[in-house]
Amino acid sequence: MKKDSSLSEGLENFIDEKVIRTEMEKANNPASGLIREILAKAGERQGLDPDEAAALLGNRDKDLDEAIFETARTIKKGIYGNRLVVFAPLYITNECGNQCRYCGFNAKNSDLDRRTLSSEEIRREVTVLEDLGHKRLLLVYGEHPRLGADWLAQTVRDVYAVTSAKSGEIRRVNVNCAPLDVEGFRKLHEVGIGTYQCFQETYHRPTYEKLHVAGRKTDFLWRLHAMHRAQEAGIDDVGMGALFGLYDPIFEVLGLLHHARRLELDWGVGPHTISFPRLEPALNSDIAFNPPYPTTDHEFKKIVAVLRLAVPYTGLILTTRETAAMRKELLEVGVSQLSGGSRTYPGAYSDPEYDRPDVQQFCIGDSRSLDEVIRSIVGDHGYVPSWCTACYRLGRTGEHFMELAKTGFIQKFCLPNGLLTFKEYLEDYASEETRQVGEALIRREIENYPDPDRKSLLTDRMARMEAGERDLYL
């Protein structure tokens, strides 16, 4: 399917390549004094301008890189404490009409086993995920012309309708699907999605046009304005991202920041989340096996740290593309949300023959189970896993959420609510080994909780949960 030029007619390209080039050139090997000034500003938690982020990314002094990492650790801890939001992706279809040269879902990839889950298959997958303890899902879709907004909305209804044993129910469904028109986004909003997520892949338009050969995704501007249309439809939590490895990583970070700025200018709030996947091997994609712009682990760690400094109150999402060791490092410098026990093709969670390159979108780097991931982040790193959905269900989203976050709201509500969802996980799903390390963490957190009134509320709800109540929050 060739590009329909009418889709993007009249849309502005607010990613100005000349501006970004200038920011990059000025930031090439900046003076150490400038780096320290920018870090001091970052410490105020008000964010950074794109040119300041470019300077940090352009730094070549290893000692100053360590200062960047340390500042990011401080800011992350100050805003999010030791809480981490946990989710899982659920692939609904790998059918796609696009020809993206880096993706296993490429419409010309005849070796890929195409699958679109039926309502019954969706219920089966969700039941498996609920029985593992998941409460937050990200639904992922290929883009096929016959699978429109009505069908997308029905799949969301199917997910929400599933309840399994114990406390099994999905409480927040986020969606990663191709850009829709405003009416299509309204249909998703009406069925209660949380965050709408869409990645530009690359903000460098010539590279974008070279990599997207056919299909609706060839339209750079239609995709670029997807968040604007989602906001217009009432979806005030949106998530953006870039696929690192396709083009210059500094250019991509600045593209993300200019995109975030434009959203804030036009809608009063920037992205709820930012993702930063690295290109991983995919079936029949030479580019996926040999990225044009490979990003080293050190460069990638610095990208995550700089994003945390530049957009301090935005959730940073880490997937299982990365190894367990790399995920540990990235959690320290900025990541606030991570997937666990992920599988990347339709029907994967109920598939006894898991590990199928002929159906999955890309290879994953961390294949541990959810329970193993939880035990590691608790026992090895002291983080509190959170499946909390209270803000979304109480209407604390979009601009309202960001206003509250900047006043310390996350520490007052999100940590205790995270502890309550963790308690629920331990009561209903955890292995005995994970339960032991988890209960020890909860006891420490309650003992050290600084607010006596909230500590009393938290203790009361913990006791009610042990008595059998579920889904409790402040």
Image: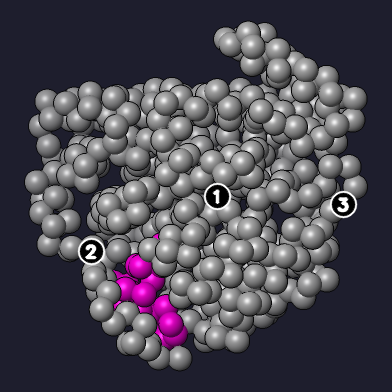
The residue wearing badge 2 is 14
The residue wearing badge 1 is 319
Disc 3 marks a residue whose amino acid type is Ser
In the rendered image, residue 110, in percent from the top left (x then y), is placed at 59, 86
Instruction: Give me the C-alpha separation between circle 2 and circle 3.
Output: 46 Å
Residue in view at x 9 percent, y 46 percent: 26
Q: In which quarter of the image is residue 333?
A: top left
Tell whether label 3 touches label 2 (CB within 8 Å). Answer: no
Seen in the image, is 182 located left or right of residue 4? right
Disc 2 marks a residue whose amino acid type is Phe
Disc 1 marks a residue whose amino acid type is Thr
Tell whether label 1 touches label 2 (CB within 8 Å). Answer: no
The disc, 2 or 3, on the residue closer to the chain's N-terminal end is 2
SS at mark 1 in the image: loop
Secondary structure of the magenta portion, mostly?
A: helix
Tell whether label 3 touches label 1 (CB within 8 Å). Answer: no
The residue wearing badge 3 is 164
Within-10-Å neighbours for mark 3: few <14, some 14–19, many 20+: some
Within-10-Å neighbours for mark 2: few <14, some 14–19, many 20+: few
Question: Against 314, is 213 above or below?
Answer: below
In the rendered image, residue 291, in percent from the top left (x then y), is placed at 38, 64
SS at mark 3 in the image: loop
The disc, 2 or 1, on the residue closer to the chain's N-terminal end is 2
Instruction: Give me the C-alpha separation between circle 1 and circle 3.
Output: 26 Å
Does residue 197 appear anywhere in the picture?
no
Q: Residue 283 carries which label?
A: none
Within-10-Å neighbours for mark 1: few <14, some 14–19, many 20+: many
Which one is closest to the eye, mark 2 or mark 1?
Answer: 2
Question: Against 215, is 55 above or below?
Answer: above
Point out the stretch of residues depicted in magenta.
207-227
